[in-house]
Amino acid sequence: METLQPEGGAQPQSPSQETSDWKRFLLDLFETVGLALILFVIINSVSARVRVDGSSMLPTLHDGEFVLVNKLAYRTGTPTRGDIIVFRSTTEANLDLIKRIVGLPGDHVVVRSGQVSVNGQVLDEPYINAAPNYTGEWTVPAGSLFVLGDNRNDSSDSHMWGFLPEPNVI
């Protein structure tokens, strides 16, 4: 008489093998989820993805675009005139804004006749949308920055609400 075996010659698993397979599966799942969480925390602690909302940075940045932000840039370096930064608003809670650094601590910023000058030097600004149609004069205090949007005439920025405290920079 012949004995029947499953096709392929596979032997049925014992209960201890089935338990071992489940343990291995759960361990693999735990390792994968754990690694994903660790990577998520690391990536989000050094960078951020920010959505541009509005037209204040036209023509450089457009409404709806996403910007990848390096959160470590100013922990290891210092702000530079011309940098585009993301910062927490000084006037509205839970609002992040994007502007360009024009004045650093100690700088004297003058906006007159459609030109921006810093410490007596007129800035070459090929990136702006249009020359500013406002005037003003500011001296940037220690621990602060003077920031303007590239769309100078349609931007709520330092010419309206004052200086940006450096700790607000993301």
Image (spheres, rainbow, N blue to C red):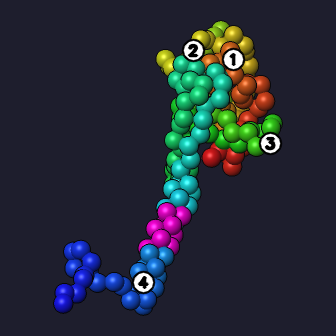
| SS at mark 3 in the image | loop
Q: Nearer the viewer, mark 3 or mark 2?
A: 3
Amino acid of disc 1: Asp
Q: Are marks 3 and 1 in contact (CB under 8 Å)?
A: no
81 lies left or right of 145: left
Q: Nearer the viewer, residue 41 or 154?
A: 41
* Mark drawn on residue 154: 1
The CA span between labels 4 and 2 is: 68 Å
The CA span between labels 3 and 2 is: 28 Å
Q: Nearer the viewer, mark 4 or mark 3?
A: 4
The CA span between labels 3 and 1 is: 21 Å
Q: Residue furthest front?
A: 1
* Mark drawn on residue 129: 2
The CA span between labels 1 and 2 is: 9 Å
32 is within the stretch colored magenta? yes
Q: Residue at x 57, y 14 (%)?
A: 129
Please identify the quadrant where the N terminus is shown.
Answer: bottom left
Q: Are marks 1 and 2 in contact (CB under 8 Å)?
A: yes
* Mark drawn on residue 18: 4
Q: Main secondary structure of the magenta part?
A: helix
Q: Residue at x 59, y 28 (%)?
A: 64
17 lies left or right of 46: left
Amino acid of disc 3: Ala
| SS at mark 1 in the image | helix
